[in-house]
Image (tube, rainbow, N blue to C red):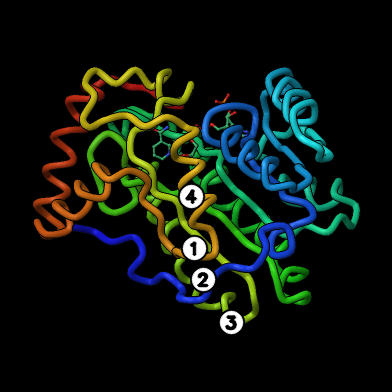
Protein backbone atom coordinates (compact mmCIF):
# COMPACT_ATOMS: atom_id res chain seq x y z
CA UNK A 1 0.00 0.00 0.00
CA UNK A 2 1.31 3.47 -0.88
CA UNK A 3 2.15 5.24 2.35
CA UNK A 4 1.84 9.02 2.16
CA UNK A 5 3.68 9.35 5.44
CA UNK A 6 6.92 7.70 4.33
CA UNK A 7 8.62 11.07 4.48
CA UNK A 8 6.68 12.23 7.50
CA UNK A 9 8.52 14.31 10.03
CA UNK A 10 8.77 12.73 13.45
CA UNK A 11 8.48 16.02 15.36
CA UNK A 12 4.99 17.41 16.03
CA UNK A 13 4.21 20.55 13.99
CA UNK A 14 4.24 23.90 15.79
CA UNK A 15 1.03 25.78 16.47
CA UNK A 16 -0.74 26.25 13.13
CA UNK A 17 -1.16 30.04 13.36
CA UNK A 18 2.40 30.57 14.48
CA UNK A 19 3.77 28.49 11.63
CA UNK A 20 1.41 29.57 8.83
CA UNK A 21 -0.18 32.86 9.92
CA UNK A 22 -1.18 35.52 10.12
CA UNK A 23 -2.19 35.69 6.43
CA UNK A 24 -2.79 32.89 3.94
CA UNK A 25 -3.08 33.48 0.21
CA UNK A 26 -5.46 31.01 -1.44
CA UNK A 27 -5.34 31.06 -5.24
CA UNK A 28 -8.55 29.71 -6.77
CA UNK A 29 -10.72 30.21 -3.71
CA UNK A 30 -14.22 30.96 -5.02
CA UNK A 31 -15.46 27.38 -5.06
CA UNK A 32 -14.43 23.73 -5.19
CA UNK A 33 -11.24 22.67 -3.48
CA UNK A 34 -9.95 26.24 -3.07
CA UNK A 35 -13.02 27.29 -1.08
CA UNK A 36 -12.76 24.12 1.01
CA UNK A 37 -9.08 24.78 1.77
CA UNK A 38 -9.90 28.40 2.67
CA UNK A 39 -12.56 27.16 5.08
CA UNK A 40 -10.07 24.82 6.79
CA UNK A 41 -7.60 27.71 7.16
CA UNK A 42 -10.24 30.08 8.53
CA UNK A 43 -11.19 27.44 11.10
CA UNK A 44 -7.57 27.50 12.24
CA UNK A 45 -7.60 31.29 12.60
CA UNK A 46 -5.67 32.44 9.54
CA UNK A 47 -6.61 35.69 7.82
CA UNK A 48 -7.44 35.01 4.18
CA UNK A 49 -6.36 36.68 0.96
CA UNK A 50 -8.61 34.98 -1.57
CA UNK A 51 -7.90 35.14 -5.32
CA UNK A 52 -10.16 33.95 -8.12
CA UNK A 53 -11.45 35.08 -11.51
CA UNK A 54 -15.08 34.45 -10.58
CA UNK A 55 -15.78 37.84 -9.00
CA UNK A 56 -19.32 37.20 -7.72
CA UNK A 57 -18.71 33.71 -6.35
CA UNK A 58 -15.46 34.93 -4.79
CA UNK A 59 -17.33 37.71 -3.00
CA UNK A 60 -19.94 35.20 -1.77
CA UNK A 61 -17.25 32.86 -0.42
CA UNK A 62 -15.37 35.73 1.21
CA UNK A 63 -18.57 37.05 2.85
CA UNK A 64 -19.46 33.58 4.13
CA UNK A 65 -16.04 32.95 5.62
CA UNK A 66 -15.88 36.39 7.22
CA UNK A 67 -19.33 35.86 8.75
CA UNK A 68 -18.57 32.36 10.07
CA UNK A 69 -15.04 32.88 11.39
CA UNK A 70 -13.26 35.55 13.39
CA UNK A 71 -10.72 36.30 10.68
CA UNK A 72 -10.11 39.05 8.13
CA UNK A 73 -11.01 38.04 4.58
CA UNK A 74 -9.94 39.97 1.49
CA UNK A 75 -11.14 38.91 -1.98
CA UNK A 76 -9.00 39.83 -4.98
CA UNK A 77 -10.65 39.15 -8.35
CA UNK A 78 -7.92 38.18 -10.80
CA UNK A 79 -7.22 35.91 -13.76
CA UNK A 80 -4.30 33.72 -12.70
CA UNK A 81 -3.43 33.15 -16.37
CA UNK A 82 -2.36 36.77 -16.74
CA UNK A 83 1.42 37.11 -17.12
CA UNK A 84 1.55 39.68 -14.30
CA UNK A 85 -0.88 37.83 -11.98
CA UNK A 86 1.71 37.07 -9.30
CA UNK A 87 2.93 40.66 -9.24
CA UNK A 88 -0.66 41.90 -8.98
CA UNK A 89 -1.12 39.72 -5.88
CA UNK A 90 2.12 40.68 -4.15
CA UNK A 91 1.51 44.39 -4.89
CA UNK A 92 -2.05 44.22 -3.55
CA UNK A 93 -0.89 42.43 -0.39
CA UNK A 94 0.94 45.66 0.44
CA UNK A 95 3.39 44.16 2.90
CA UNK A 96 0.94 41.87 4.75
CA UNK A 97 2.72 39.05 6.54
CA UNK A 98 1.92 35.94 4.47
CA UNK A 99 2.74 32.66 6.20
CA UNK A 100 1.00 30.30 3.79
CA UNK A 101 0.46 30.10 0.06
CA UNK A 102 -2.16 27.58 -1.06
CA UNK A 103 -2.15 27.45 -4.84
CA UNK A 104 -5.27 25.49 -5.77
CA UNK A 105 -6.57 26.83 -9.09
CA UNK A 106 -5.92 24.96 -12.29
CA UNK A 107 -6.83 25.19 -15.93
CA UNK A 108 -7.38 21.93 -17.74
CA UNK A 109 -7.41 20.82 -21.32
CA UNK A 110 -9.40 17.73 -22.19
CA UNK A 111 -9.37 16.29 -25.67
CA UNK A 112 -6.97 15.15 -28.37
CA UNK A 113 -3.79 17.23 -28.14
CA UNK A 114 -4.04 18.62 -31.68
CA UNK A 115 -7.75 19.39 -31.40
CA UNK A 116 -7.31 21.53 -28.32
CA UNK A 117 -6.35 25.09 -29.22
CA UNK A 118 -2.79 26.18 -28.63
CA UNK A 119 -4.19 29.05 -26.58
CA UNK A 120 -5.86 26.55 -24.21
CA UNK A 121 -2.62 24.59 -23.81
CA UNK A 122 -0.77 27.83 -23.10
CA UNK A 123 -3.41 28.90 -20.59
CA UNK A 124 -2.97 25.60 -18.75
CA UNK A 125 0.77 26.18 -18.55
CA UNK A 126 0.26 29.74 -17.32
CA UNK A 127 -2.26 28.93 -14.56
CA UNK A 128 -0.76 25.61 -13.45
CA UNK A 129 2.98 26.27 -13.85
CA UNK A 130 4.11 29.84 -14.50
CA UNK A 131 1.95 31.72 -12.01
CA UNK A 132 2.70 29.37 -9.10
CA UNK A 133 6.43 29.70 -9.79
CA UNK A 134 6.12 33.49 -9.96
CA UNK A 135 4.03 33.65 -6.81
CA UNK A 136 6.34 31.39 -4.81
CA UNK A 137 9.26 33.51 -5.99
CA UNK A 138 7.45 36.58 -4.67
CA UNK A 139 6.31 35.16 -1.31
CA UNK A 140 8.90 32.58 -0.24
CA UNK A 141 11.80 34.98 0.52
CA UNK A 142 9.89 36.57 3.43
CA UNK A 143 8.91 33.12 4.77
CA UNK A 144 12.55 32.00 4.63
CA UNK A 145 13.74 35.21 6.26
CA UNK A 146 11.47 34.76 9.27
CA UNK A 147 12.09 31.01 9.44
CA UNK A 148 8.50 29.77 9.17
CA UNK A 149 5.78 29.36 6.61
CA UNK A 150 4.17 26.92 4.23
CA UNK A 151 3.45 26.33 0.57
CA UNK A 152 0.67 24.01 -0.58
CA UNK A 153 0.54 23.15 -4.27
CA UNK A 154 -2.29 21.21 -5.85
CA UNK A 155 -1.11 18.46 -8.14
CA UNK A 156 -3.25 15.41 -8.98
CA UNK A 157 -3.11 11.64 -9.34
CA UNK A 158 -2.84 12.62 -13.02
CA UNK A 159 0.61 14.02 -12.23
CA UNK A 160 2.14 10.61 -11.58
CA UNK A 161 2.03 9.47 -15.21
CA UNK A 162 0.96 10.67 -18.64
CA UNK A 163 -2.43 9.87 -20.14
CA UNK A 164 -4.29 10.33 -23.41
CA UNK A 165 -6.79 13.20 -23.63
CA UNK A 166 -5.22 15.16 -20.76
CA UNK A 167 -1.62 15.56 -21.96
CA UNK A 168 -0.84 19.15 -21.04
CA UNK A 169 -2.92 19.05 -17.86
CA UNK A 170 -1.19 15.83 -16.68
CA UNK A 171 2.24 17.25 -17.54
CA UNK A 172 1.46 20.46 -15.65
CA UNK A 173 0.43 18.43 -12.60
CA UNK A 174 3.71 16.47 -12.78
CA UNK A 175 5.42 19.86 -12.81
CA UNK A 176 3.56 20.93 -9.67
CA UNK A 177 4.40 17.67 -7.91
CA UNK A 178 8.11 17.84 -8.71
CA UNK A 179 8.24 21.56 -7.95
CA UNK A 180 6.75 20.91 -4.50
CA UNK A 181 9.08 18.00 -3.76
CA UNK A 182 12.11 20.03 -4.83
CA UNK A 183 11.09 23.07 -2.81
CA UNK A 184 10.39 20.87 0.22
CA UNK A 185 13.95 19.58 0.13
CA UNK A 186 15.26 23.12 -0.25
CA UNK A 187 13.04 25.09 2.12
CA UNK A 188 12.33 22.70 5.01
CA UNK A 189 15.76 23.40 6.54
CA UNK A 190 14.77 27.09 6.46
CA UNK A 191 11.54 26.44 8.36
CA UNK A 192 9.16 26.50 5.38
CA UNK A 193 6.96 23.42 4.84
CA UNK A 194 6.03 22.46 1.30
CA UNK A 195 3.32 19.94 0.44
CA UNK A 196 1.88 18.67 -2.82
CA UNK A 197 -1.73 17.51 -2.70
CA UNK A 198 -2.57 14.81 -5.27
CA UNK A 199 -6.32 14.26 -5.22
CA UNK A 200 -8.22 11.72 -7.25
CA UNK A 201 -11.68 12.50 -8.63
CA UNK A 202 -13.30 15.11 -6.40
CA UNK A 203 -16.89 16.33 -6.63
CA UNK A 204 -16.20 19.99 -7.47
CA UNK A 205 -18.05 22.24 -9.91
CA UNK A 206 -15.04 22.05 -12.26
CA UNK A 207 -15.06 18.23 -12.18
CA UNK A 208 -18.79 18.15 -12.85
CA UNK A 209 -18.37 20.59 -15.75
CA UNK A 210 -15.77 18.26 -17.30
CA UNK A 211 -18.69 15.80 -17.71
CA UNK A 212 -16.89 12.46 -17.24
CA UNK A 213 -18.82 9.65 -18.94
CA UNK A 214 -17.71 7.11 -16.32
CA UNK A 215 -16.63 7.45 -12.69
CA UNK A 216 -13.36 5.52 -12.49
CA UNK A 217 -13.08 5.43 -8.70
CA UNK A 218 -14.99 6.69 -5.66
CA UNK A 219 -15.35 10.47 -5.81
CA UNK A 220 -14.34 12.41 -2.70
CA UNK A 221 -15.92 15.62 -1.45
CA UNK A 222 -13.83 18.81 -1.59
CA UNK A 223 -14.27 19.13 2.16
CA UNK A 224 -12.74 15.69 2.82
CA UNK A 225 -9.77 16.41 0.53
CA UNK A 226 -9.16 19.82 2.08
CA UNK A 227 -9.44 18.50 5.64
CA UNK A 228 -6.90 15.77 4.90
CA UNK A 229 -4.29 17.95 3.21
CA UNK A 230 -4.48 20.80 5.71
CA UNK A 231 -4.17 18.28 8.54
CA UNK A 232 -1.03 16.81 6.92
CA UNK A 233 0.59 20.18 6.18
CA UNK A 234 4.05 20.22 7.72
CA UNK A 235 3.98 16.45 8.13
CA UNK A 236 3.94 15.02 4.60
CA UNK A 237 5.53 16.31 1.43
CA UNK A 238 3.06 14.46 -0.77
CA UNK A 239 -0.53 13.87 0.27
CA UNK A 240 -2.89 11.54 -1.60
CA UNK A 241 -6.28 11.98 0.07
CA UNK A 242 -8.45 8.87 0.31
CA UNK A 243 -7.53 5.23 0.92
CA UNK A 244 -8.92 4.16 -2.48
CA UNK A 245 -6.75 6.73 -4.24
CA UNK A 246 -3.66 5.63 -2.32
CA UNK A 247 -4.40 2.01 -3.18
CA UNK A 248 -4.88 2.87 -6.87
CA UNK A 249 -1.61 4.78 -6.90
CA UNK A 250 0.17 1.83 -5.30
CA UNK A 251 -1.20 -0.55 -7.93
CA UNK A 252 -0.18 1.72 -10.81
CA UNK A 253 3.31 2.27 -9.42
CA UNK A 254 3.81 -1.50 -9.45
CA UNK A 255 2.87 -1.81 -13.12
CA UNK A 256 5.83 0.10 -14.50
CA UNK A 257 5.52 3.38 -16.32
CA UNK A 258 4.46 2.29 -19.80
CA UNK A 259 1.74 -0.10 -18.65
CA UNK A 260 0.49 2.51 -16.17
CA UNK A 261 0.24 5.13 -18.93
CA UNK A 262 -1.66 2.72 -21.20
CA UNK A 263 -4.03 1.66 -18.44
CA UNK A 264 -4.78 5.21 -17.30
CA UNK A 265 -5.20 6.26 -20.94
CA UNK A 266 -7.85 3.59 -21.45
CA UNK A 267 -9.68 5.06 -18.46
CA UNK A 268 -9.38 8.70 -19.58
CA UNK A 269 -10.59 7.73 -23.07
CA UNK A 270 -13.67 6.17 -21.49
CA UNK A 271 -14.17 9.15 -19.19
CA UNK A 272 -13.73 11.63 -22.00
CA UNK A 273 -14.50 9.96 -25.36
CA UNK A 274 -12.61 11.67 -28.18
CA UNK A 275 -14.05 15.13 -28.54
CA UNK A 276 -12.27 18.38 -29.03
CA UNK A 277 -12.49 20.71 -26.10
CA UNK A 278 -10.66 22.72 -23.55
CA UNK A 279 -11.20 24.07 -20.12
N1 LIG B 1 -11.74 18.06 -8.94
C1 LIG B 1 -10.99 17.01 -9.17
O1 LIG B 1 -11.49 15.92 -9.47
C2 LIG B 1 -9.48 17.10 -9.07
C3 LIG B 1 -8.74 15.93 -9.17
C4 LIG B 1 -7.35 16.01 -9.09
C5 LIG B 1 -6.74 17.24 -8.90
N2 LIG B 1 -7.48 18.37 -8.81
C6 LIG B 1 -6.78 19.63 -8.63
O2 LIG B 1 -7.35 20.34 -7.54
C7 LIG B 1 -7.32 21.74 -7.79
C8 LIG B 1 -8.70 22.34 -7.63
O3 LIG B 1 -9.58 21.72 -8.53
P1 LIG B 1 -11.14 22.09 -8.63
O4 LIG B 1 -11.82 20.88 -9.11
O5 LIG B 1 -11.58 22.74 -7.38
O6 LIG B 1 -11.21 23.09 -9.87
P2 LIG B 1 -10.54 24.49 -10.26
O7 LIG B 1 -10.97 24.74 -11.65
O8 LIG B 1 -9.11 24.52 -9.98
O9 LIG B 1 -11.36 25.47 -9.30
C9 LIG B 1 -10.87 26.11 -8.14
C10 LIG B 1 -11.17 27.59 -8.28
O10 LIG B 1 -10.12 28.18 -9.08
C11 LIG B 1 -10.72 29.02 -10.03
N3 LIG B 1 -9.87 29.24 -11.19
C12 LIG B 1 -9.61 28.39 -12.21
N4 LIG B 1 -8.84 28.99 -13.13
C13 LIG B 1 -8.58 30.25 -12.67
C14 LIG B 1 -7.86 31.36 -13.17
N5 LIG B 1 -7.24 31.32 -14.36
N6 LIG B 1 -7.79 32.49 -12.44
C15 LIG B 1 -8.44 32.58 -11.26
N7 LIG B 1 -9.15 31.57 -10.74
C16 LIG B 1 -9.23 30.41 -11.42
C17 LIG B 1 -11.99 28.26 -10.38
O11 LIG B 1 -12.91 29.04 -11.10
P3 LIG B 1 -13.67 28.33 -12.36
O12 LIG B 1 -14.15 27.01 -11.87
O13 LIG B 1 -14.74 29.25 -12.72
O14 LIG B 1 -12.63 28.19 -13.44
C18 LIG B 1 -12.48 27.86 -9.01
O15 LIG B 1 -13.20 28.90 -8.39
C19 LIG B 1 -6.73 21.92 -9.18
O16 LIG B 1 -5.36 22.22 -9.08
C20 LIG B 1 -6.92 20.56 -9.84
O17 LIG B 1 -5.93 20.29 -10.80
C21 LIG B 1 -8.85 18.34 -8.88
Task: Tell me the CA gap for discs 3 and 4.
Answer: 21 Å
Residue under numbered circle 1: 180
Whether 41 is drawn above or below 239: the answer is: above
Residue under numbered circle 2: 184
Q: Counting residues from the N terminus, which is met first, the one under dot 1 or under dot 3?
A: 1
Residue 182 visible to the viewer: yes
Q: Residues within 10 Å of mark 2 (few under 14, many from 20)?
A: many
Of the 4 image quadrants, the one containing the N terminus is bottom left
Q: Residues within 10 Å of mark 3 (few under 14, many from 20)?
A: few
Residue 223 placement (x, y as % from top left)? 50, 33
Q: Residue furthest right?
A: 94
- Who's the residue at 73% across and 18% down the image? 56
Nearer to us: label 4 or label 1: 4
Residue under numbered circle 4: 229
Residue under numbered circle 3: 189
Q: Which structural element holds mark 2?
A: helix
Task: Tell me the CA gap for discs 3 and 2.
Answer: 9 Å
- Which quadrant would residue 188 be assigned to in this image? bottom right
Amino acid sequence: MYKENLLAKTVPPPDFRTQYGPWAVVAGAAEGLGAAVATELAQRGLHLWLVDHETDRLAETADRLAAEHAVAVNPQPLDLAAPDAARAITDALDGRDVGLLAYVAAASTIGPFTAVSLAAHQRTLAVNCSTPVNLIHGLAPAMCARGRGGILLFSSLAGFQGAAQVSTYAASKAFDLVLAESLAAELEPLGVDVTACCPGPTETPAYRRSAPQIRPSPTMTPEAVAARVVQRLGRDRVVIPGAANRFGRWLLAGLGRRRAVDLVSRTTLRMYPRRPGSG
